[in-house]
Amino acid sequence: MTYRQLYGEIRSRLGDDAQAYSFYLLNRPLPELSADDGVVPGSVLDTHKDAVKRIEEGEPLQYVFGHAPFYDLYIDCGPGVLIPRFDTEVLAEEAIKTLPENAVFADICCGTGCIAAAVLNSRKDTRAICVDISDKALYYTERNLKKYGLFDRAELIKLDVFDSWDGLPKADCILCNPPYIAAAEMKELPENVKREPYEALYGGEDGLDFYRRIITASKGHFKGEPHIIFEIGYRQGNALRQLTGGKCEIKKDLSKNDRVCVIRGFL
Ligand SMILES: C[S@@+](CC[C@H](N)C(=O)[O-])C[C@H]1O[C@@H](n2cnc3c(N)ncnc32)[C@H](O)[C@@H]1O
């Protein structure tokens, strides 16, 4: 099979995923393949045959290839852990720009550890406490931090944030992308998103359970003045303003949607 033929097959079988798939499979932009009459090596075709079938069956591309781009890193991921999202880079960037010098930050609900990895990698003066309820998440966090030589600046803690925070060391700042999808929206999720862990997505009836809990439970867990950077859903800006009595700043993503909520000081 030639790259030109592969181009036709990828386009017809994968639709919206075709562009990303071309990068995952070949590290080449899709349009480039359309004019290439070179022969695709057998090993690549074998990978392609297996991958395209799994994706057609609804498996997310990032699980099939085992990683996802995040900030300036490639984060390992797989079934059982949330795939890092482009939107979450807004939170990571806010932290990278605003954490005080030598900060200790807590990445609560760390998942793959993508946020902690991006911040630790860009801010060599910082240290992280990574927290999640899921063994799979902590496994991937450790793996990703080790992958980039960041593990010696991190502590990993298994904790249900609805339990006591007594064992959690104090931090200068809490970073958190919690589960924030409301009950009604859970039913509308695309099929491939439903392959991701339910407990990484569901944020309670109104989607706000984790924000309420973390705002309350984090009191007394800061070294100095409270500083929380949350990722929020694109329709949750007003809800967070209400929850904090207006004492927060809502920041937008590149699509001009509400995406990050910054809380500084006591509420
Ligand atoms: C939306 S994901 C975020 C993952 C990662 N921080 C990211 O941005 O890709 C939420 C994470 O919260 C974790 N989680 C769910 N319930 C939890 C709980 N009660 N306590 C601690 N972590 C929890 C899930 O395991 C999941 O990894």
Image (spheres, grey):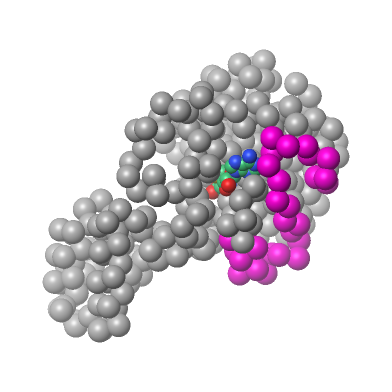
Q: Which image quarter: residue 174? A: top right
Q: Is residue 154 above or below residue 167?
A: below
The residues colored magenta run 140-169
Q: Relative to 186, is 122 on the left or the right?
A: right
Residue depicted at 71% across the width and 46% down the height: 159
Q: Is residue 90 magenta?
A: no
Query: In which quadrant will I find the N terminus?
Result: bottom left
Answer yes or no: is residue 122 visible.
Answer: no
Q: Is residue 80 above or below residue 245?
A: below
Query: In which quadrant will I find the C terminus?
Result: top right
Residue depicted at 51% across the width and 23% down the height: 206
Q: Where is residue 53? Give x, y as percent.
A: 25, 64
Residue depicted at 75% across the width and 41% down the height: 173
Residue depicted at 26% across the width and 64% down the height: 52
Q: Which image quarter: residue 229? A: top right
Q: Where is residue 102? Give x, y as percent.
A: 81, 52
Q: Where is residue 210? Give x, y as percent.
A: 62, 32
Q: Where is residue 105? Give x, y as percent.
A: 74, 47
Q: Is residue 41 above or below residue 230?
A: below
Q: Is residue 1 above or below residue 160?
A: below
Q: Relative to 61, is 13 on the left or the right?
A: left
Answer yes or no: is residue 208 visible.
Answer: yes
Q: Is residue 161 magenta?
A: yes
